[in-house]
Amino acid sequence: MNLDPPVLADDYLDVLPARIRARVVADPTGCHLWTGGMSGRTLGAGFAQINGTYEYVHRAVWRLNGRPLAPHQIVVRICRKPRCVRLDHLRATTASAWLLAIRHGLDLAA
Ligand SMILES: [Zn+2]
């Protein structure tokens, strides 16, 4: 049994400041989890000062990697882990579409 932490294979985190990157670790399921502060006590999201502005970490990963995000869209995690910031686990959608997907068990991974 290998107890070494999984290696972060992707370079998408390179867009983040080093002190932010250092707080992301891989978990055994393949998610890349933010280990720093959260915006809320329960269902919050990773929240940090990035390039001078406080921002959700997963949203910063999306934006700084050049992914499109319309003003009415939110960035969600298809793995549904509040701490996950892995780029290929993120999708841009609307709040209403995301709530519908959760309510009806739809998969937004496609
Ligand atoms: Zn994930």
Image: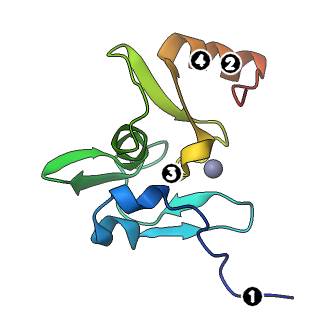
Query: What's the amino acid at mark 3?
Result: Val
Q: Position of residue 31 (x, y in %)?
A: 64, 57
Query: What's the amino acid at mark 4?
Result: Leu
Comes first in the chain, label 4 or label 3? 3
Query: What is the C-alpha distance between the residues marked 4 and 1?
Result: 37 Å
Q: Answer left or right for 81 relative to 49.
A: right
Q: Residue furthest left?
A: 52
* Camera-nearest residue between 40 and 17: 17
Q: How is the image coloured?
A: rainbow
x 39%, y 62%: residue: 14
Q: Answer left or right for 5 relative to 95.
A: right
Q: Tell whether label 2 touches label 4 (CB within 8 Å).
A: yes
Comes first in the chain, label 3 or label 1? 1
Query: What is the C-alpha distance between the residues marked 2 and 3?
Result: 20 Å
Q: Residues within 10 Å of mark 2 (few under 14, many from 20)?
A: few
- Label 4 vs label 1, nearer the camera: 1
Query: What's the amino acid at mark 2?
Result: Ala
Q: Tell whether label 3 touches label 2 (CB within 8 Å).
A: no
Under circle 4, the secondary element is helix
Comes first in the chain, label 4 or label 1? 1
Query: What's the amino acid at mark 1?
Result: Leu
What residue did someone put label 4 on? 99
Query: What is the C-alpha distance between the residues marked 4 and 2?
Result: 5 Å
Comes first in the chain, label 2 or label 3? 3
